[in-house]
Image (tube, rainbow, N blue to C red):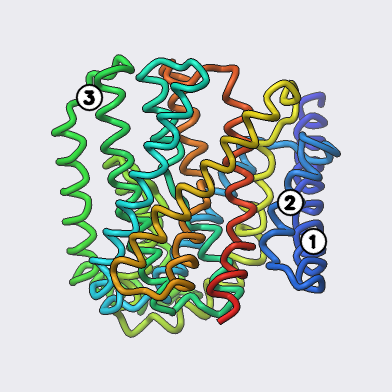
Amino acid sequence: MRQSNFISRRSSMFFFTILIILLATKLAGDICVRLGQPAVVGKLLIGVIIGPALLGWVENSHIIDELSQIGVLLLMFMAGLETDMDDLKRSFKSSLAVATGGIIMPLIGGYLLGLAIGLDIAQSLFLGLLLSATSVSISVQSLKDLNLLKSKESTTLLGAAIIDDILVVILLAFVMSFFGGSEVSLGLIIGKKIIFFLIVAIFIWKLGKWIMKWLAPLRVSEAVISAGLIVCFLLAFIAEQFGVAGIIGAFAAGLAISQTDYKKEVEHKIEPIAYAIFVPIFFVSVGFSVSFEGIGDQMGLLVITAIIAILTKLIGSGLGARLTGFSGRSALGIGSGMVSRGEVALIIATIGLQSGLLAQQYFTMLVIVIILTTIVTPYLLKMTIGRK
């Protein structure tokens, strides 16, 4: 009887949490739109407000975290569906330049900052790598709100984010193998990335079409969208197994299905599923990581780190775009889209904490910096390419 009551209370609290998240995100998004601001900003800020940092109405939990992971995967899956494969190929040179500039400058800036505050070489390099990370999930939503997801800038941005993810993971493995006590071979890390992208190429070329043709005709309800989601989660799973972020696998799945005759149907039916529940939970969960406890003594360092994080990415990636033929405004827009560190940097920060490459005293401060870069990205995008 007691166990039954306990399960009932847990269920009711879970339902209440979902209720608060959905209601709060929709209202916050609407208020921001009425104020002329990107809706995604309200959804991010409301996570800080209703989360543990301020009101404490809802707290992060394992199931909320899992639902938010589904949300970000679906967000990147939809981005892949709307991306033109030919445009992505044509923008490779620009994407490589954007990613390279967006890694070099934050790496240097973070390394010098680390040395300036008394960190050793290993910790300083790790700080630079942390600031070099990029997560475009928030940028994707912002570009979608601005109706720019199919633009040349967006395609370059998405390509750069993929390259950035791969390069940062390889550099992180290199640093950890030397300083973090990791015995993982750098050659193995690089080899796994190569194998993953060979698998992606096969999916985009043939396998994605075969899976859709096999599963879509099944005589069950919503067979086409189910087949699309199977491809999405399959590639996300494969990506994680090969040491690549799951969001890259989800994006690749979207690209694979965009080459099939089922693209329009999957795209039309996935949006209601994603935006009704999973994507709002993802946006709110980003704010759940914020804690202001003991941050007062590090306020100056927080401001300096945030400025370095924003400017180095903006200038580095923007310079890469400018050197490959983009106008000044478009280059700034691409640089703006690379500013968000999001869940990728949060994962790297946790790895650093566990390996000893990130001191506990700086963890909370860096989490807030990561959230700040995520929140300012929609504003920067709107002020640059959003005003075309």
Q: Nearer the viewer, mark 3 or mark 2?
A: 2
Q: Quadrant of residue 317?
A: bottom left
Q: Quadrant of residue 184?
A: top left
Q: Are marks 2 and 1 in contact (CB under 8 Å)?
A: yes
Mark 1, other Cα within 10 Å: few <14 / some 14–19 / many ≥20: many
Query: What type is the residue that disc 3 sits on?
Result: Val
Q: Position of residue 289 (x, y in %)?
A: 65, 36
Q: Position of residue 64 (x, y in %)?
A: 64, 43
Q: Position of residue 97 (x, y in %)?
A: 28, 59
Q: Which mark is residue 45?
A: 2
**Image quadrant occupied by the N terminus:** top right
119 relative to 324 in the view: left or right: right
Query: What type is the residue that disc 2 sits on?
Result: Leu
- Using the numbered discs, state the Cα–Cα distance from disc 2 to disc 1 in whole angstroms: 8 Å
Q: What residue is drawn where x is 50% and y is 46%?
A: 341
Q: What residue is drawn where x is 30% and y is 66%?
A: 323
Q: Are marks 3 and 1 in contact (CB under 8 Å)?
A: no
**Image quadrant occupied by the C terminus:** bottom right
Taking depth in this image into account, of 45 and 331 the one nearest to the observer is: 331
Residue indicated by mark 3: 184
From this view, report whether residue 261 is shown above or below residue 85: below
Residue 234 visible from this viewpoint: no
Residue indicated by mark 1: 28
From this view, report whether residue 75 is shown above or below residue 143: above
Q: What residue is drawn where x is 82% and y is 36%?
A: 56
Residue 301 visible from this viewpoint: yes
